[in-house]
Amino acid sequence: MKKIISVCMGDGVGPEVVNEGVKVLKIISDYTEFNFEFKDAPAGGEVWKKIGTNLPEKSFETIQNSDALLFGALGLPDLPPGVAESAIMKIRQGLDLYVNLRPVKLYDVLREKCPLKDEFIGNGIDITFVRENTEGLYKNVGNLKEDSAQNLMLYTRNGCERIIKFAFEFAKRKGHKIVTSVDKANLLNTSKLWRKIFHEMSGNYSNIETEDIFIDAFTQWLIRAPYRFQTVVTGNMFGDIISDEGAFLIGSLGMGSSGNIHPGKVSMYEPIHGSAPDIAGKGIANPIGTILSVKLMLQESFNSLEIGNEVDKAVEEALNEGRTVDIKSAKLKTLSTEEMGDLIAEKLKSSLKK
Ligand code: IPM
Ligand code: MG
């Protein structure tokens, strides 16, 4: 099965972690029925410095004509905030990637790396945030004047329906028992519409329980009882914030993966960490966020739950043997980015060979 994967290395640690993601994809290409071809789609701060745009037209075309995009991270410390990063918005809006899927899973072997006390971890953390990814405050409607500034938080019925439906379908697929909706319906009109649609939609999924939690309370519950959440659906800005909070629970930001998805269309997979200029070029960044984004690509874009699960298993096995410095253990070897990728690739290769 031939698939074209566009690859954007990005800035900072982007190229270092993306190389490891590509390494894993190449193993899959070698040992399964998939046949991947890679196409470069440069974007970000380095590109901006060279040619004055953070997303060259040619890159966007390459992305549009691919089956999926593997994306590094954008941002450079010597550029004003947003100059590089806005390329991500152009891709999300340009491809109408309305789902931002962000799993927050604490591997058992990393339990001691979770900053929460054991009693709060309970029987484990395995949450998937389903964040609306094209509407709300991210519509870029507003202005910035000398004495005032404005951003419009705009949600449409169609925008709410499609993301909430995705969340229920996702929960159904994963066998989740409950979908939690996070909003601010005690204040915001947008949340009132959201909540109404959430309740309407829940009628189609009678086997799945639902609950509504206000965003402020949710930020507490996420550290007080994270074990009780499974699928959590929310708007764009709230999703941005709580997914970072969630990522802190899994040992390292470097473990966080994500998919920017339009089901059935070209979608983009990226680690949730940024370009981390402070450690760029040192070869110490954790590539697992990127490798788990590859897992999401397999499951969400290429319909291959099985190989995705193999990637997951390979990551877990590797974590028992060696780790990058952000999740290091005195008992295990501390690995470079490349060594971590090699170890995972090796584990994956031996399970795929069977
Ligand atoms: C994310 C990031 C982006 C966002 C930034 C870089 C604009 O924080 O992917 O969560 O806010 O969506
Ligand atoms: Mg964010």
Image (cartoon, rainbow, N blue to C red):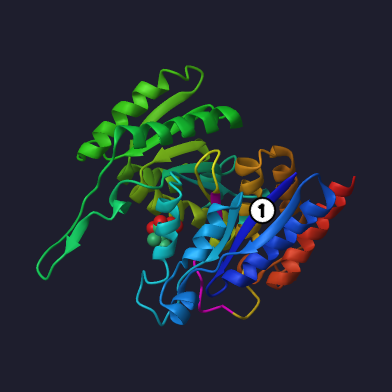
Q: Is residue 270 a member of the stretch shown in magenta?
A: yes
Residue at the outermost right position: 354
Q: Position of residue 267 (x, y in %)?
A: 54, 48
Identified at 67% across, 68% down, the residue is 324
Can see residue 341? yes
Indicate the quadrant where residue 82 lies: bottom left
Identified at 60% across, 49% down, the residue is 106
Q: Position of residue 304 (x, y in %)?
A: 70, 39
Main secondary structure along the magenta-highlighted residues: loop
Can see residue 113? no
315 versus 217 height, above or below: below
Q: Quadrant of ligand 1?
A: bottom left
Disc 1: residue Cβ within 8 A of ligand 1's nearest atom: no
Residue numbers of the magenta segment: 267-280
Identified at 28% across, 51% down, the residue is 137
Nearer-the-camera pick, 247 or 307: 307
Q: Is residue 293 left or right of residue 98?
A: right
Q: Residues within 10 Å of mark 1 (few under 14, many from 20)?
A: some
Q: Position of residue 31 (x, y in %)?
A: 84, 50
Q: Is residue 176 a member of the stretch shown in magenta?
A: no
Q: Is residue 351 left or right of residue 105?
A: right
Three-letter amino acid code at the position of disc 1: Ile
Indicate the quadrant where residue 332 lies: bottom right
Q: Position of residue 177 (x, y in %)?
A: 53, 26
Nearer-the-camera pick, 117 or 336: 336
- The image shows a total of numbered marks equal to 1
269 versus 298 height, above or below: below
The residue carrying mark 1 is 4
If the image is split into quadrants, where does the N terminus sit?
top right
Mark 1 lies on a secondary structure that is strand
Indicate the quadrant where residue 158 lies: top left
If the image is split into quadrants, where does the C terminus sit?
top right
